[in-house]
Image (tube, rainbow, N blue to C red):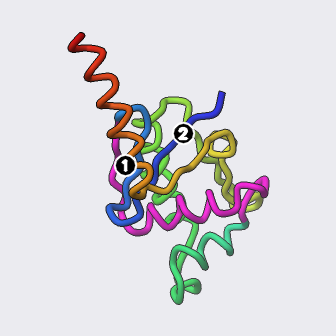
Amino acid sequence: MMKIIVIDETMRSLSFKGKIILLTKKEFLLFECITNERKEETISVNDVIGYVWQGRETIIGRINISQLIFRLRRKLTFLDSSADISFSMANGVGSHYLKKCILVKDNILIRFILSFTQSILYKKVRE
């Protein structure tokens, strides 16, 4: 079953089934990097470093990437316990979980749909 994750780029937040997480700038960049390249099995470590740490590639090491992935994974599992991100210096970064998700950028249309759906539910509860 496909899962729908709503992305709010302005707030750097993700929401799923009423749960919301806020991401740091680097966590959001990592999430973007992974989700922009979902067609690939994994993204190379060099591509991730270049995307997240633009201009600082020469001083970033395994510990920086590991810590960032740990933080993002922990936040994603708050949204959904089956969320995963894999990491290996040899194989790169990937997520089978995110490949199964529909990612929707939060905008006026999405807000309208959500408020419309909530108003219908509210009316049914009041009846």
The answer to if 26 sits in the magenta stretch is yes
Residue placed farthest to the left in the image? 126
Total tally of numbered discs in the picture = 2
Q: Horizontally, is 121 left or right of 92 in the view?
A: left
Please name the residue shown 46% across and 37% down the image. 77
Quarter of the picture containing the N terminus is top right
Residue placed farthest to the bottom in the image? 55
* Coordinates of residue 21 in the picture (x, y in percent): 35, 47
* Coordinates of residue 126 in the picture (x, y in percent): 21, 14
Q: Which residues are magenta?
A: 19-43
Q: Horizontally, is 83 left or right of 46 in the view?
A: left
Q: Height in image: 26 above or below 5?
A: below
Q: Horizontally, is 101 left or right of 107 in the view?
A: right
Mark 2 = which residue?
A: 4
* Coordinates of residue 93 in the picture (x, y in percent): 66, 57
Task: Name which residue type carries label 1.
Answer: Arg
Image mark for residue 111: 1
The answer to if 101 sits in the magenta stretch is no
Image mark for residue 119: none
